[in-house]
């Protein structure tokens, strides 16, 4: 295979669709600072996702940083080691102590049964991740948080368009954070958003993302620059016209993978979304059991790579294994046994709307030939 095939590739509209927006930006010379396309995109995106209050951000990591600051989170926060490192980094940047707990062995989400045992007097919040876009056990987490008066900040970076019990996954928690990075189901090249439930919290977030400014001469708090610019917002407006179609195409790719890879000895596929969930097919992870499959996950990764197929080991290594987290008491391997099993066996296969049938078949044939 000559053309490199990556685990995901950005879905972009035709340039002709974006040009009128760029011409308008050049005409008015408003490039950032809550410009007209920013306002339009914020309103249309909130309506699309059916969420009450939404603040656009320059990227998902800045959204996490800002969300934690807006809710005045301090002390210890319970979170997952099985995620992209930005989840935990957002805590360290806010001088918050990450407390890792183990994940469930099927979906890789925070295990509610482990959360309660990790709560101490220093615990102020829970930061779960809807891993691969699969909803956490939201009701159980909410019950625990309410009983202990903890905030819940959902890292919903993988979860654009996902519905749980008929409403957007972003409606849950005290706030939810989305990412619109180029590799996501919905992208603005870089970008993100914070979803909250009341006008007061949105005002705090909007102050924080613009250095704390309330007006030209009034600074309300020590903010940061995490604003989305007009070009990102314009791309987002165009992308909204295509996202439903793109998710449907991703579903077709996932269905084809499932058809071709089911019942391979030593290979586990993640189950389909629960009946109460509408999925977005953000990722297609497989899990390799080396003794039964016939080779290791890493050997399969290298075999695919040799054929220009660049799968990804999301998420390996665990966050808890990086140097800045290794010394935390909760990073102990015995504390995170299920997370380690997933991290050492996972391989996310390429999935994006333009992935062709023949490429899917080629990838699956290579996987079958190894088993």
Image: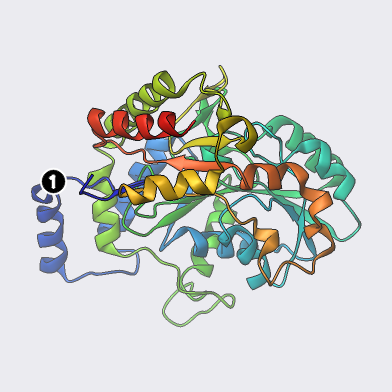
**Rendering quarter of residue 131:** top right
**Rendering quarter of residue 121:** bottom right
Q: Viewer-proximal residue, 106 or 127?
A: 106
What residue would you read off at disc 1? 14
- Vertical comparison of 115 with 271: above or below: below
Q: Describe residue 78's horizontal placement relative to residue 220 as left or right.
A: right
Residue at point 57%, 50% (across, down): 315
Residue 228, given in percent of the width and then of the height, sits at 37, 63
Tell me the SS state at disc 1. Answer: loop
Q: Is residue 157 visible?
A: no
Residue at point 34%, 69% (across, down): 33
Q: Viewer-proximal residue, 141 or 40?
A: 141
Residue at point 51%, 62% (across, down): 61
Q: Describe residue 52's horizontal placement relative to residue 41 as left or right.
A: right
Q: Viewer-proximal residue, 229 or 311?
A: 311
Q: Viewer-proximal residue, 138 or 302?
A: 302
Residue 58, given in percent of the width and then of the height, sits at 40, 63
Mark 1 surroundings: few (<14), some (14-19) or many (≥20) residues within 10 A: few
């Amino acid at each position: 295979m000559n053309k490199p095939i990556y685990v995901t590739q950005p879905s972009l509209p035709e340039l002709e669709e974006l040009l009128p927006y760029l011409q308008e930006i050049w005409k008015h010379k408003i490039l950032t600072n809550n410009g007209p396309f920013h306002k339009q995109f914020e309103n249309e995106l909130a309506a699309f996702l059916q969420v009450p209050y939404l603040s656009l951000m320059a990227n998902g990591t800045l959204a996490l940083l800002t969300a934690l600051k807006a809710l005045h989170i301090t002390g210890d926060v319970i979170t997952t080691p099985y995620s992209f490192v930005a989840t935990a980094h957002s805590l360290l940047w806010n001088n918050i102590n990450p407390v890792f707990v183990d994940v469930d062995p099927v979906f890789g989400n925070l295990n509610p049964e482990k959360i309660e045992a990790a709560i101490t007097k220093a615990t102020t919040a829970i930061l779960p991740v809807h891993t691969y876009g699969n909803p956490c056990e939201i009701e159980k987490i909410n019950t625990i948080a309410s009983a202990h008066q903890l905030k819940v900040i959902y890292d919903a970076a993988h979860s654009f368009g996902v519905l749980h019990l008929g409403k957007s996954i972003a409606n849950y928690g005290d706030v939810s954070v989305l990412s619109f990075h180029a590799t996501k189901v919905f992208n603005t090249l870089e970008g993100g958003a914070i979803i909250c439930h009341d006008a007061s919290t949105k005002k705090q977030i909007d102050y924080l993302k613009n250095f704390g400014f309330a007006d030209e001469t009034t600074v309300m708090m020590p903010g940061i620059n995490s604003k989305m610019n007009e070009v990102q917002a314009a791309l987002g407006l165009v992308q909204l016209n295509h996202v439903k179609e793109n998710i449907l195409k991703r579903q077709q790719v996932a269905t084809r993978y499932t058809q071709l890879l089911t019942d391979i000895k030593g290979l586990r596929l993640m189950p389909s979304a629960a009946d109460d969930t509408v999925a977005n097919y953000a990722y297609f992870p497989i899990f390799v059991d080396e003794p039964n499959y016939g080779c290791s996950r890493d050997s399969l990764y290298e075999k695919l790579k040799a054929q220009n197929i660049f799968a990804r080991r999301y998420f390996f290594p665990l966050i808890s294994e990086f140097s800045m987290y290794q010394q935390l008491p909760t990073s102990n391997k015995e504390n995170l046994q299920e997370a380690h099993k997933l991290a050492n066996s996972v391989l996310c296969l390429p999935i994006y709307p333009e992935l062709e049938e023949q490429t899917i078949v080629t990838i699956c044939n290579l996987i079958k030939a190894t088993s």
